[in-house]
Amino acid sequence: MSRARVLHRSLVAGVALLLVVFVLLKYRGLVPFLTLEAGRTLIAFVLAGAGLASVLVGLLIMSPRVPRRPVGQTEQIYLDRDDVIARALLVWALCESGGGIAAVGFALTGAMPPLVVSVAALLALTSYGPGYFSERVLSNPRL
């Protein structure tokens, strides 16, 4: 198994575990952690927005910067390249941190917008895994 796959699976597991714990705490009546009503909505939307911004930067700005796989290169060799791992890891870290920020927003406030953003971040993280990047083949290596 490549280093990229191990890193990616670890990040996915971290966000998924965080979400599961916070949702279970919500159903046990322990979330929201903030007991004050004043400012709870603002905190929910600020943390949801910060999480969404992180995910969007990862997907829209950093993801296109991951090098495409040359035609003759195997998936294993491509995923073991340091330049590919470094740039893909940046995309994954931005998605993972966005999901974590939003999950904390859900835990603090119990509001749905941060939960939705956190689930979207988890879906983005799983969709933009090593397989996604290795399937993007450079059709003309001279470009």
Image (cartoon, rainbow, N blue to C red):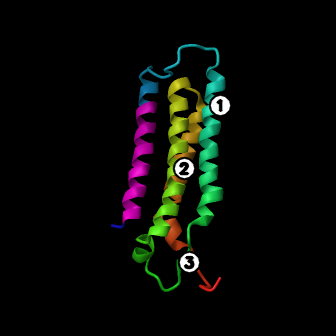
**Image height of 130 relative to 76, above or below:** above
Q: Which residue is mark 2?
A: 94
Q: Which residue is mark 3?
A: 137
Given contact means CB atoms under 8 Å apart, are the residues at marks 3 and 1 in contact? no
Q: Amino acid at mark 2?
A: Leu
- Local secondary structure at mark 3: strand
**Quadrant in which the N terminus is drawn:** bottom left
Q: Is residue 100 left or right of residue 6?
A: right
Residue 129 visible in rendering: no
Q: Which label's residue is closer to the chain start, 3 or 1?
A: 1
**Image height of 9 relative to 85, above or below:** above
- x and y percent of residue 35 in the render? 53, 14
Q: Is residue 63 magenta?
A: no
How crowded pointer 2 is (Cα within 10 Å; few <14, some 14-19, many 20+) is rated as many
Residue stretch rendered in magenta on the structure: 3-23
Alpha-carbon span between mark 3 and mark 2: 23 Å
**Quadrant in which the C terminus is drawn:** bottom right
- Local secondary structure at mark 2: helix
State the predominant SS element of the stretch in magenta.
Answer: helix
Residue found at x 46% / y 38% = 19
Residue found at x 59% / y 61% = 63
Which residue is most to the left?
A: 1
- Local secondary structure at mark 1: helix
* Res. 132 mark: none
Q: Is residue 104 left or right of residue 77?
A: right
- x and y percent of residue 75 in the render? 44, 75
